[in-house]
Image: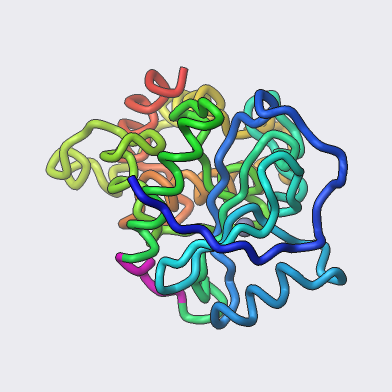
Amino acid sequence: MSIKITSNYSPNFNPIKRKPNQIKFLVFHYTGMRNDSVAIEKLTNVKSNLSCHYFLKKNGEILLMVPGSYIAWHAGKSKWKHYKSLNRHSIGIEISNPGHEHNYKPFSKKQTQSLIKLSKTLIKKYKIKSQNILGHSDIAPERKKDPGEKFPWKELSKQGIGLWHSLSIQLLKKNRKIELDQVSKKIFFNNLSKIGYAMKKTENLKNRKFNNYIVKAFQRRFRQELINGKIDKECLIISNNLAKKFA
Ligand SMILES: [Zn+2]
């Protein structure tokens, strides 16, 4: 598998080296900026305090911005399972896409092809588990929507990159928008915790709002046809299926 990577370094990283076995996650992002050059300028500008390890241009070209042995600044405040501040434990990949704020577009075929090659290389190099391949919104749901509902998670999972459910489209459609009782909602939230989302106890409004962001993050990732923040039977059966796989 040939993979061409060009260096385009960012000064934004933690200068203390980390060991390869500290790297447990791949985190996918979209840039949320109008085009490649605006995004590259930002991610390599010392004033932005932002960076990533790899940058995928619109045409699929891969840029190395920070070598994997250093911590790049891509995830910010974040949480997954018992991990906090995922930067320390992850490789961050930024994929050029204008994002929800600038007319969100499908990812290009060439970007997806490059992402598959790059991810396979990194999974092998750092022995990254399938359940540790995440989107930015999974680990920072109240702040982030990226990589969003157009991200090809299903296609990637077929290549062994990340987890996906094993339910038929017909079954899912049949259960879409069917309301749930309180007991089933509890099961759903419990499943999200098992998957790794940082669910909060629902005793106050602030926590319930936070959990609602998690519901949307879950939908952007696993029920991309309808992002409405409402839990229905389709969400429940997907979460049942995934809770076992992520365990
Ligand atoms: Zn991001």
As drawn, the residue found furthest toward the left would be 170
The answer to if 107 sits in the magenta stretch is yes
Note whether 85 is above or below 34 in the view shown.
above
Q: Total label count?
A: 0
Note whether 82 is above or below 153 in the view shown.
above
The answer to if 188 sits in the magenta stretch is no
Find residue 244 and report its horizontal and vertical position in percent.
Answer: 38, 18
Q: Residue at 66% of width from left, 59% of height from top?
A: 65
* Quarter of the picture holding the N terminus: top left
Find residue 57 and report its horizontal and vertical position in percent.
Answer: 49, 70
Q: Residue at 63% of width from left, 74% of height from top?
A: 39
Please identify the quarter of the rendering in which residue 86 is found: top right
Q: 27 left or right of 60?
A: right
Q: Is residue 142 in view from this perspective? A: yes
**Nearer to us in this view, 41 or 69:** 69
Q: Is residue 182 in view from this perspective? A: no
Find residue 116 and report its horizontal and vertical position in percent.
Answer: 37, 48
Q: 217 left or right of 18?
A: left
Colour convention: rainbow
Q: Magenta residues: mostly which secondary structure? A: loop
* Bounds of the magenta segment: 104-109
Q: Residue at 36% of width from left, 58% of height from top?
A: 112
Q: 191 left or right of 84?
A: left
Q: Residue at 66% of width from left, 47% of height from top?
A: 140
Please identify the quarter of the rendering in which residue 184 is found: top left
Find residue 36 and report its horizontal and vertical position in percent.
Answer: 55, 78
Please identify the quarter of the rendering in which residue 91 is found: top right
Quadrant location, ligand no. 1: bottom right
